[in-house]
Amino acid sequence: MEQVTLFVLLTLSYLFVISIILKKLGGREMLELEKEVKKLMEKAKKGDKDALSKMNKLNMTRMKTMMKKQLYLWPLILVFFWYIKKTFIELTVTIFGRQIGWLGTFFIIVLLFSTVADKLATRLLENFKLI
């Protein structure tokens, strides 16, 4: 159980650090794009075709920008996965009667907590006026 707790804490820390780095790399530009997309989404829900088209273009711009910035994180990601695999190779967790290894457990944790880490990183950076 101690090993599982350590694994969960490391994974949550990793998610939080990655979220902070991505928010910092994106900066104000990404926040403004996200706000504009939200405004356009409201208009698109009401049936505005022009707003839908603009929203799609902004989403494509946002995705391209973030993909470029994520390339800088590959060394950090690879080192983290190498360390996790080396340290927790024997880790198995039973969920709903199934044995899941370290990689499956990692993906479950990421799916459950990525949004929380993202929102927490955004609020932290905004409160300290770092973005």
Image (cartoon, rainbow, N blue to C red):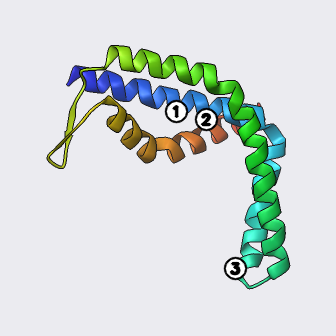
Give the amino acid type for the residue marked by disc 1 in the picture.
Leu
Give the amino acid type for the residue marked by disc 3 in the picture.
Lys
Circle 2 sits on which residue? 19
In the shown orientation, is residue 88 left or right of residue 12? Answer: left
Q: Where is residue 71 in the image (x, y as percent from the top left)?
A: 70, 30
Q: How far apart are marks 2 and 3 (CA)?
A: 29 Å
In the shown orientation, is residue 117 left or right of residue 84? Answer: right
Task: Tell me which label, 1 or 3, sits earlier in the chain.
Answer: 1
Q: In which quarter of the image is residue 30?
A: top right
Task: Tell me which label, 2 or 3, sits earlier in the chain.
Answer: 2
Local secondary structure at mark 3: helix
Q: Kindly give the residue lying farthest to the left in the view shown.
A: 97
Circle 1 sits on which residue? 15
Q: Quadrant of residue 90?
A: top left
Q: Distance between the residues labelled 1 and 3?
A: 32 Å
Asked whether 85 or 46 is in front, the reply is: 85
Mark 1 near mark 3, Cβ–Cβ under 8 Å?
no
Q: Which mark is residue 101?
A: none
Q: What residue is drawn where x is 82% and y is 41%?
A: 28
Mark 2 near mark 3, Cβ–Cβ under 8 Å?
no
Q: Quadrant of residue 27?
A: top right
In this picture, is 99 found above or below 3? below
Q: Quadrant of the C terminus?
A: top right
Asked whether 64 or 125 is in front, the reply is: 64
Circle 3 sits on which residue? 45
Visible residue check, residue 83 = yes
Q: Position of residue 92 (x, y in %)?
A: 22, 30
Give the amino acid type for the residue marked by disc 2 in the picture.
Ser
Mark 1 residue crowding within 10 angstroms, few (<14) / some (14–19) / many (20+): many
